[in-house]
Every structure is written in structure tokens, then in C-alpha cells.
Amino acid sequence: MVRVQVWGSLKPAIGGDDSVEVEGETINDLLKALSEQYPGMAEAVRRGVSVTVNGEMYANAVMVPVKPDDEVFILPKLVGG
Amino acid sequence: MNVQPDNKAMKRDFDIVGKRTPRPDGIDKVTGRARFGADMSMPGMLWGLVLRSPHAHAKIKRIDTSKAEKLNGVHAIVTSKDFGPCDDSLLDIRENVMAREKALYDGHAVAAVAAVSRSVARQALKLIKVDYQVLPHVTDVDEAMKPDAPVINDKLFTKGLDKTPKKPSNIAERFEFGHGEVEKGFKEADLVIERTFRTEATHQGYIEPHACVASMGADGRGEMWVCTQGHFMVRNTCAGLLGIDVSNLRVTASEIGGGFGGKTTVFIEPVALALSLKANRPVKMVMSREEVLRASGPTSSSSIDVKIGMKKDGTITAGDATLRYQGGAFPGSAVPYGAMACFAPYDLKNVRAIGWDVIANRPKQAAYRAPGAPMGAYAIESVIDELCRELKLDPIDVRLKNASSDGSKASYGPNFGVIGLKATLEAAKNHPHWKAKLGKNQGRGVACGFWFNFGGETSVSLNVNVDGTVGLSVGTPDIGGSRASIGNMAAEELGIPHDKVRCIIADTASLGYNDVTDGSRVTFASGMAAIQAARDAIGKLCERAAKIWGIPVDAVVWEKGHARPASPNAGKHEPLSLADIAAQAGATGGPIAGHCEINAEGAGVSFATHMVDSEVDPETGHVKILRYTVFQDAGKAVHPSYVEGQFQGGAVQGIGWALNEEYIYSKDGRLQNPGFLDYRIPVCSDLPMIDTVIVEVPNPGHPYGVRGVGETSIVPPLAAISNSVSDAAKVRMTRLPMSPPNVLKALGRI
Amino acid sequence: MFQVHVRTRINGDDTEFSCEADETLLDALRDRLGLTGAKEGCGTGDCGACSVLVDGRLVCACLMLGAEAEGCDIETVEGMADGSKLHPLQQKFLDHAALQCGVCTPGFLVAAKSLLERNDNPTEEEVRYWLAGNLCRCTGYDKIVRAVLDTAADMRKASKPKPAKAKKASAKGRVSA
């Protein structure tokens, strides 16, 4: 299990907490598991998110591996100028 | 893909990286030969022009193009009917490039014509009759949020709330970031200050208006010449909007006359393509400056509440902010990034930032250099400055005390890696500027700023030519000298002189997909890909040397531009230069090339501290910038002149935003200042020299330690200037721009 | 539309063109003659990207009609270099990295040339005020001003030392909105 933290607005989508534990070995696994378990997360994932693993930001490289003790954070999809 | 940190490389002495070499496109740009968007013509070309809504909000009842169609010389007219079904992700863009049931802002495109000359096209526009039913409108962010505001989109229900509301509104989404308990934190504070700030919408103000030539043949194959930050984005978007196979559209990026985020999307490009499709001839479209200001993508206006608590020793106990940004007539303002970035410079136990994304009858906002961050930083850094003043604390010491550092938890969630904020603050504290004397009516301000920086999808191709020169194709348009910095990194890696590498921007048919030039990503990501492509080529060069010498390839090493035997055991062979091997390429196995296709990760965030002195004229309210110094972490400055240029350019755009620039709408919802005379960007005589201090805290995510530098430089100026003016005027400024009337109001003079 | 026949000299070459009566000199240069070095940034004389010299006067080509150029001697950025030899200002702009995107550069070069022809020893303030009609959004002007001051210093060194004080710039030299 990997503890996934979400940005504040997604708290209601995962039941009010700011984090939840899900099964998975890659970012993709985690997003899929979250989408299946929480409809609110499914919508957020569909619209696009950025994920950080140990502080490193991944915009769409979802095959990045994750380990149980990694710090994983889901954030809105970023844009730049 | 993540390139492993190469700590040896970071500490090593570079031969080319860090040097101020001449830029490869320099001669073309000083002689007038460089071809920008509007400089291209094609045989048989028509001119396209757009008819735009004069109303801020109106139902389009009928468009009659019959008279215009009959005008001699008119070859095509398009309206929203010419843009058929498309993917959901493109719906807002489709509606923004051509209004459908309603015109949503003053300047919204309603129809377009292509004719043999501009004058015929202008006449044709006058012959198009549009029946509008004018609707109530709203342009102000706070007004748009009120329950009785005119509803712009009746299918818009606020997202991000515990319960989705039953009624539609102009509030698209609520965002929340933070951790800890802010109320508990405020109780621990010795002083809590709460303030509300306002900023007006500003425009990127690139000097080159949007321009393109589109040519669609009867065989369904098209070509486009476009001034854009991302020609692959233009290709994919236009193909998606018009139902064309991506491979049938080849897009070439022109030289680009500035973008700053404003050229990361499409406006006239799909329209030109639709006209060309209909006319079966090439169509050129060039926006006027008025069109650029009315109908491209300015930034959000904002209204922000901030509450921060501080102890007498300068410790920040809690920070709470609510940011409201209107992003024009469609959801997607930059408010989440503002909310994420605003407290990022500080390591806080209790922090919360709430963002409200609001729509209004204004053009759909586009990215503008660190989108959303400058306004948030303005509000937070202003309150921190006021707390320091009230508690009689040094503003740099307080920032150092609370500054984020390696491993600290960012206000927006994750932990930071290796960061350079404290280094910029130390540099500021030790700079002579900090101790310089100030005169009457003069003040000094400092502020910090943060931006994320991106990597993204990147594809690079490197060809070794027969004479030992190298052609380097990248897919990220060069706005500020990136061909020089990317070419220099490839030359550094190959060990050849910088002028032996020619870096070009390849078209969409010649290279794999590349994300847009945005997010300060190009020198980082295309540079990383160029280094990888050079390493790929070096592997092949070593193979050829091994073949020539008849030794195994692992007995060959690459050093300073030469293949050498790895050890005396490999035999005695004279080193072969890149040119020596290139000359024999045909005989040893054919052309030699290196490639790299990556999704570059590890961009490494960037921080800056700005310091500014200003003088306020109490009679006129005029603010003069006297002295300005930028301290920013560049990781590794590949080409210091262009790093300085990014620092200076960002600071001066910030000066414009802080002092003069604003979108002014009248009561009827029309933009009142769509020209450079009334939308006043800083001119040469407004400014002092902009001093720069390049701080280098290497980014472990890049082989040379590079961090993006383009965007962070616009984050601190609004706050630094406001703090400076507040110091000079002895009154806290809470509204931008600090134009003479607003300064006189703050001084109580009018 | 009715077209006007115009005879001019452009960058030393006798040149004739036809243009519509309401067509700007800028459009005529760019679209009729292929001289696209001068850029349109605003069309209202506010940005200086279309700066050219007409009979030695600095003009925004977007504010003058093509037809008005009859009999005029016009200099554009394309005529600044002497063959492959760059004008000192062009070289200094490169040396000082005084351009980023480069779209304003032709206008700045023409305007700066016009300044140095009138005043070979301008102060920083004089440079800043002379160039105030040219907008640059990338550089913050710092490196541009340095490039112009450095060019002036070099050009003074190259010419014979003058005993008299340098002539002041004439405020009438510039025609723009």
C-alpha cells in the first residue's frame, strides 16, 4: 500500500481525509485504483492531475514506479507561460 | 524519463557552458533577415480578417454573409458552422476561436473572410450583418461571484465544493491547499494582519502580434507557418478542430516576437486553416494590436484576502489566503497555481490557500509568465512586509528565518528537493544595494517569489556532418536565445567548438512531438535531450573508431572531442577527432546521428528575491523606479547573458504590471484601452539599469545542474515594488496598478 | 482599388512601386517590396518596430502613407550593414546580447543610428529618452542602452578627437505619435 496525499479540494472526494492508502506499483496504478474506489477522484484524474513522488513533479509520466514509503502527492495539472 | 544526477559534471569546469557566446540567429535578427510570423508569403495567397463582437455578452440570432460573399475578390467566409464536432477537451478552444450561440466578450470572433487583399477583406467585413440580442454582462471578479450576477454559462456548476450546487453560477471551481491548523496558528501569534488586495488584468504585451499563413490543398494535406510557442500544439489543435489527420498537417514555427505564455494556445490559426480549406488557397492572417489586446489571452484580474500571524521574533505562525481570479469567459484561470505558489517560499506549520476560479465577460485568459503566481505573491509578501514594519524586524532576516529550504514541506503539499531561496536572500543581504542611503520620498522594498518549472515531452535529433560540424534539430521555438544555450550544451558534451554546432527549430514533420515552449522548460528539457542525443552520437562515434582501429568498442573512450584508446592495452592509436570519424562515416557504416525522446522530469523549482528603490511624487502620484536588483537561482547559467536577460525582462514586465498596465472596461463591457498608447508598457525612459545577481544552486535533476529561469523573475516584482512604494509613501498600498490616480487616492489627495 | 505610382530611393537603390492610396509606407515596404525588416507591432506609431529614416528623419513607417514617399530617400534596417560588414550598432547589439526575441531590434537599430548621427556622445538619459518611442518587452532595455552607449564610445574613439562639446540631440529629430 502507498499513502497518497491529495490537494485540499479533493478531500471530499476521498471521504474527508487529506490522504488515503491504495495498492499500486506505479503512478498509473495509484490513479487507477483511486478512480475505481472514488468517483470524485475519477473525474479529477480524467481532467488531468500532476503527481509528485518524493518532491519530484510528474505531469504525465504515469509509468513512474512508486514504493510504499514514497511521499506521493496529487496536485492540479500545471501549466506554464 | 529521469536523467541521473551527474554530480561530477556539476562540479566540473565547463569549456563552453557558462560562456557568453554569440547567438546563432544574431546576424539574421540585426539585419532584418529573420522571418517572423507576418514576414511569410505564399503563391496565390489571400488575406484573412476577423469580424468581432462589439458586445460584452450577446446572443447571436443571425449572421447574414450573403452580401459579403458577392463582393468581388472574396473567396471564403467562415462562421462557427464551419467548425464541426471535436473532442471534448477542445470544446472551449473551438468556442473561443469562433463564437457559437453567444458572443462572450468584446472582441469575440463571430465570422472571418478571406479575400485577395486586405482592403477587399475589410470591405467584406462591413457587409456581414450580425443580429445580436444584447445580454447583461459582468467583467469584475467580485461582481461576477455575487448571487445576482448575470450567469454567463448556464451549464456551469461550481466544482470542488462538498456538494455540487443546484444553480449555475460564474464560479467554476474552488481549490484548497495547505496543512496544519491556521486558527491555532493565529492564536500563537503576537501580531496578526489581515488585508485585501486587488490587481488588474494585464497582457503579455509581446511586440509581435499573432500571425500565420495556412495552406490546405485539395489533396487534404496542409502546411502552416505560425508564430507560436509550440508548433506541435498548433498542429494537434488545428487538426483536432477541423478533423484533419495529424500527419496531414505540417507546421513550421516562424521566428517568434515574444510570447510570455500568450502564444501557448491558438486564436486565428484554426480560422486561417478553415478559410484556406474553403478557398482552396493559402490564407495569411495577422492580428492588429487592437485585436491582440481585445481578443487574445491576457492574464486574470484578481481580488485576494490575506491573513498572516507573526511572533515578535519574526516566526510566522500561520498564513491564510483566499484568492479570486477571473479568467475570462471560460473556466481555467491560473488561480490554482497562484494558490499553490503564494506561500511556497515559507516553511509554515499552519497554512491554507483557497482559490476561486471565476468566469466573466472578458477574453479567455492565457498563460502569462508563471501564470497566477505574481498576484498571490504580491498579496502575501505585502502582508509579511507590513508585519516586519509593525514589529520593527528586518524583512530579509524574517524571510531567512521562515524560508523554505532543502527537504522542507511546501505550502502546496510535497517536500522540496535542493532549493536556493536562502542563497538568494543571503546574496540580497550582502549586496551594497541593501545598505545604500535613501532620500526624501524614497523607499525600498524586497520580496521573494517561487515558480515550479516544467520538463515535459521533448524530442531532439543530432546529425554529425561529413566535415565534422553538427546539425541539431529541436522542436521548441526559441524566444530568448535557447538555440545558443542548447547548441552550447551539445557542443560541450561532444567536446567541439560551439560554432561547429548549428541548432535549428525543426518543423512538425521532421521530429517527434514536443511540448510547447513554456514552464521555463526549454533550456532545461531540450538541453537535457540535446545532451542525451550527443551521448547517443558519441556512442556511435566510439563504435566507428573501434571499427577503424580493429579493437572492441569498450576499449574506446571519448575525451575533449576525440576518440582515444581507453588504456595502453588497447594498442597505440592516434586519437580520432569527431571530424576524422565523420569524414569516414560512409565507409564505416553510414551516417552518424544521435537521438533523444524523453518526457523530461526533474525540472527543479526556482526562487528569487528582488530589491527595489522607488520615489513617489506626492504632488502627482507618479512613481519612479530608482534602483532594481534581481537575485535568482539559475541552477547553472548556461548562457549568462540570456539568464540576465530573463531576470531583467521579468522584472520590467513586473514594473509595468505594478505601476501602469491594466485592462480598463467601461460600463458597457467594452475594452477602453486596446492600444499601446493607453495600455502603457514600460518604455526605456521609465527605467534604471536592472542589476542582476545569478545564484547557482545546481539542480540534481539535470546533468549540468540547470534550472528554468524564465518565469520566476516576474513573481516578486509586484510585491517588491508595492513594498517600496509603501515605504516611500508611508502608507500601505493594496491595489495595482500604482498609477498616479491610485497613488493619490492612497495618499488621501483625491 | 486605385493605385498610386511612387518613385523613391531605398537603401541607395532607385525603386518604384504601386500602392493603394490609403496604404501605409510600412505595408508598401513589406508587402510590395519584400522589405520585411521593419515590423508592425501596433500600427499606431506607439511601438517603433517599423522605424525607418525618410530623408534622414526618424519615422514610424506605419504613420506615413506609401504615396507620401514619392521622391524620398528611405533607409531601412536592411540597408544598415555594408555588405557583410555590420554597422557598429548591429555588432554591439550582438556583443551585448541586446536582443531576445529580436522583433523590436530592427526598429531600435534604426532609431539608435539616427541618435548617434545627431549626437555622438549621448548620456544614458539621452539614450533612454531618444529610444522611448521603441518598445521592447523582452530585455527590460538594460542591454540595449549599454549597447548604444558602447557603440557611441567606440565611434568617438575611431573618429578624430573633437575639441568642442558634443552637439545636443534635437528633439525635433523624431516624428512619431
Image (spheres, coloured by chain):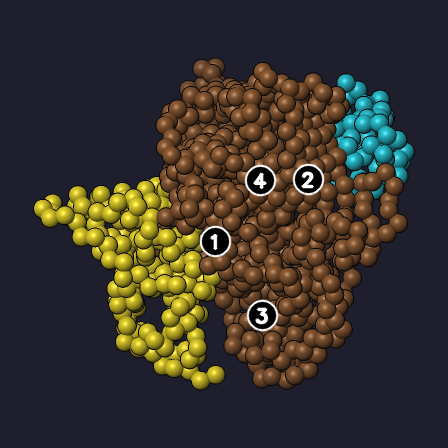
Q: Secondary structure at mark 3?
A: strand
To which quarter of the image does residue B17 belong? top left
Query: Label 2 belongs to which residue?
Result: B323
Q: Earlier in the sequence, mark 4 or mark 1?
A: 1
Can residue B443 be seen by looking at this rendering?
Answer: yes
Q: Amino acid at mark 4?
A: Thr
Q: Residues within 10 Å of mark 2 (few under 14, many from 20)?
A: many
Q: Residues within 10 Å of mark 1 (few under 14, many from 20)?
A: some
Q: CA distance from mark 3 to mark 1?
A: 26 Å
Q: Amino acid at mark 2?
A: Leu
Is the residue under label 1 in contact with that under label 4 (CB below 8 Å)?
Answer: no
Q: Secondary structure at mark 4?
A: loop
Q: Earlier in the sequence, mark 2 or mark 1?
A: 2
- In the picture as drawn, the residue positioned furthest to the front comes out as B749
Q: Which mark is residue B680?
A: 1
Residue B149 point in image, percent of width and height: 76, 55
Residue B36 point in image, percent of width and height: 48, 57
Q: Amino acid at mark 3?
A: Leu
Q: Earlier in the sequence, mark 3 or mark 1?
A: 3
The N terminus of chain B is located in which quarter? top right
Q: Earlier in the sequence, mark 4 or mark 3?
A: 3
Q: Secondary structure at mark 2?
A: strand
Q: Colour of chain A?
A: cyan
**Which residue appears at 81% of the width and 46% of the height?**
B158
Is the residue under label 1 in contact with that under label 3 (CB below 8 Å)?
Answer: no
Tags 4 and 1 on a common chain: yes
Q: Residues within 10 Å of mark 3 (few under 14, many from 20)?
A: many
Q: Chain of mark 2?
A: B
